[in-house]
Image: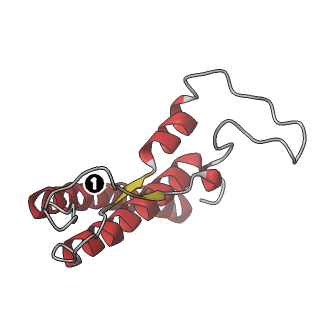
Amino acid sequence: MMGDFNWKVMEKTMEGLSKRFEATSRNVANASTPEYARRNVSFEDQLRDLVDGPRRLPMKVTDEGHIPSGPMAVSGVVPQEMKIFDEKFRLDGNNVDPEREMAVLSQTRMAYNAMSRFVAKKSSLYRLVIGGR
């Protein structure tokens, strides 16, 4: 399992989705806090570039001081939490739309459940191979 690329991608996806759960839950909890800027977590683009290959020619890293053009490995993908300041939903400066946040929670829950099923299926395949049945 340690060298399996698909396993690492599933693990990183579940990590990103759990961070999105946390950020969205914080958004819902602060829906009535004045001047609160909602948070969004992004990681799918990094994973997509890693799995499908970059859309542009990757820069070659020949020294530790070089800055890579994208993640070189799945472990290099980091879910990024960003504050969204440019949207105003209410007059007090709060930009949390409870309906949108609930939709994000539902979408994230469905994606997390689907990924959990993939992980369970992959684990059962490993058990089958190891057990020989």
Q: Position of residue 33 (x, y in %)?
A: 21, 77
Asked if residue 69 shows in the view, the reply is yes
Residue sitting at the far front: 91
Q: Residues within 10 Å of mark 1 (few under 14, many from 20)?
A: some
Image quarter in which the N terminus is found: bottom right
Hey, which quadrant is residue 83 in on the image? bottom left
Residue sitting at the far right: 63
Q: Position of residue 107 (x, y in %)?
A: 20, 54
Residue visible at 46% across and 40% down?
Answer: 45
Image quarter in which the C terminus is found: bottom left
Asked if residue 124 shows in the view, the reply is no
Q: Nearer the viewer, residue 70 or 88?
A: 88
| Number of disc labels | 1
Amino acid residing under circle 1 = Ala
Hey, which quadrant is residue 114 in on the image? bottom left
For residue 102, above or below residue 5: below
Residue visible at 60% across and 22% down?
Answer: 56
71 left or right, relative to 130: right
The residue labelled by disc 1 is 111
For residue 45, above or below residue 11: above
Residue visible at 64% across and 39% down?
Answer: 70
Q: Position of residue 91 (x, y in %)?
A: 13, 63
